[in-house]
Amino acid sequence: MDDLDGRLIDLFADDPRVGVLEASRRLGVARGTVQARLDKLAATGVITGWGPDLSPEALGYPVTAFLTLEIRQETSSGGHDAVAQHLEQIPEVLEAHTITGAGDLWVRVVARSNADLQRVIDGVLDDARIVRSSTVIALATQVPYRVRPLARVGLSE
């Protein structure tokens, strides 16, 4: 990545509906250059999508919680992959990661209320491969999920 790639990412992150022609005007480069750079960034996996960012809160899910799951350690039951397939069926599961330490999977979920969170947790635990769960409720988001600072670090090195 170079400075133009960084400026292009910033522009589309700040104004995703800008369009290639307008981006070329704002950046002072040819339309074909903008398109080629966007194609390259997408092909190399730097840009992973163009869809809108959705707010769980605005969709009616203001409660965020993190579940640490311990799963059965037998390979015949499918392990992490099988539990992940179960979790993918639950709309309130936003992401799940295999982790080290005290637990096997870390799962971010949302719910309509604290009472509704119990329903979501019960749905998560409705898999015999899950042995135990602990839950932490998020009170506020101090730093939202972000990746753009990583791109800036790469440009300064």
Image: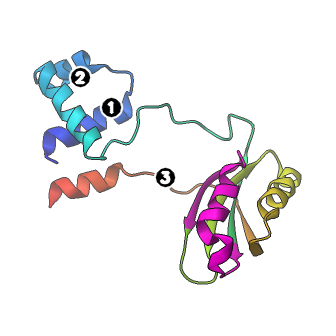
Q: Is mark 2 on a helix, strand or loop?
A: helix
Please state which amino acid type lies under the numbered disc 1: Phe
Q: Is residue 46 above or below residue 131?
A: above
Q: How packed is label 1: few (under 14 Cα within 10 Å), some, or many (20 or more)?
A: some
- Determine which residue is flagged by label 2: 23
Please state which amino acid type lies under the numbered disc 2: Ala
Q: On the picture, is 39 further left or further right than 65? A: left
Q: Residue 30: image x %, image y %?
A: 10, 21
- Determine which residue is flagged by label 3: 145
Residue at (65, 51) in percent of width and height: 88
Q: On the picture, is 100 further left or further right than 64? A: left
Mark 2 or mark 1, which is nearer the start of the sequence? 1
Between 82 and 141, the residue placed more toward the observer is 82
Please state which amino acid type lies under the numbered disc 3: Tyr
**Could you say which quadrant of the image residue 72 lies in?**
bottom right
Q: Residue 27: image x %, image y %?
A: 17, 27
- Determine which residue is flagged by label 1: 12
